[in-house]
Amino acid sequence: MKTDLSILIVTYNSAPLIAGLLDELHRQLNASSGIKAEVIVVDNASTDATADLIAHDYRWVSLVRSARNLGFAAGNNLAARQARGEFLLLLNPDAVPAPAALTAGVELMRAHPQVGLGGGKLLAPDGTPQPSARMFPTLRDELFTMSGLAARYPQSPLLARLDRRWADPELAAAVDWIPGAFVFIRRNVWDTLGGFDERFFMYYEEVDLCRRLQDKGLIVQYWPALKATHIGGASARTVARARVSRAGSQLESWRMRSALLYYRKHHGPAAAWGWKTLESCWTLLRRLRNRAAGRVEQLQELRAHSRQLAQAWHDTRGGRLSPAKPW
């Protein structure tokens, strides 16, 4: 019997979350007679016994233990090589699909053959919507975000273009890219694209994938009827001695490296330099303001940010090279 859906999950220190997710997937798959699915987990050398928990309590899951942390992109590529499904679902361990979302996702993908990748609405645990469908970043957008204008005017299609907060989240739409926490993609499209570009250890890999997918004439589609509860940044917060963004969800050094790689790949060396210059200048302005105000803690944080930015530029040779893994 053919497999309709392969659910790919990459874990890293996900023990507190993975049981709840796998229990929900088991319930949905048992309740659905419409699709045949498999679950494949690649564990990225967790240190909290995530893999042992899965192996012991969830024997129906196909578990791949990686001896080292491959990152999100390479981890999903490894999982996809084990997959047999017509469609792939990339699913974060901190994202739990709503009831019947698995079947609904497969049905929507089959009903819209022009869609290469589709995703739904991400909701925080308290039910508030998260940015779930986004636009490709530009240096102008980065400036509006850094300056706070995007947050101050979230309904402006110009100033808040990146996260599409100005758009009605209840309307389906073709968009530029969708976060990789909960997305369906056709297996043949994945194979044609070669999966994720493994130069991105973490962050921007789904932006890059969606750009390449649209270059093939396919659509990236947002369907609000598909829903998943998403914590966000759960694995990032388990990385020892790593600086997490003030939003609490992104590892700063990894974000910086991936941004430089992305801008260099898709917009050239001048864009990579421009992104680094924007970050540097805005951080410098904030440092001067906090120094004048005597805010010691904030000043120390901004100095650390500047050091990380300089290191990211050095590590990637201005966006040309991906540093040796793990980052």
Image (cartoon, grey):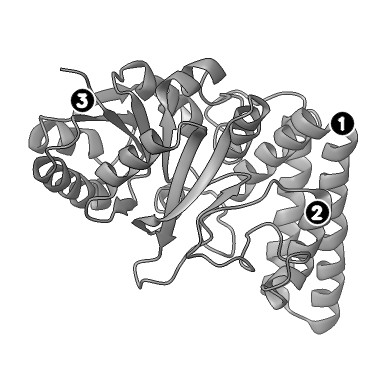
Considering depth in this image, is 29 or 308 the residue closer to the camera? 29
Q: Quadrant of the N terminus?
A: top left
Dot 3 falls on a residue whose secondary structure is strand
Q: Between disc 2 and disc 1, whose residue precedes?
A: 1
**Does 302 appear above or below 255?**
below
Inter-mark Cα distance, 2 to 3: 42 Å
Residue 325 pos. (x, y %): 55, 25
Q: Which residue type does callout 3 highlight?
A: Ser
Task: Single out the residue that lies furthest toward the front.
Answer: 111
- Residue denoted by label 1: 269
Can the viewer see residue 319? no
Q: Which residue type does callout 1 highlight?
A: Pro
Residue 279, disc: 2
Q: Between disc 2 and disc 3, whose residue precedes?
A: 3
At horizontal 14% and vertical 42% (from top left) the residue drawn is: 32
Q: Would residue 104 be found to the left or right of residue 267 on screen?
A: left
Residue 95 pos. (x, y %): 34, 51
Considering depth in this image, is 8 or 110 the residue closer to the camera? 110
- Please tell me how crowded label 1 is: few (under 14), some (14-19), or many (20+) other residues with Cα within 10 Å: some
**Mark in front: 2 vs 3:** 3
Considering depth in this image, is 83 or 244 the residue closer to the camera? 83
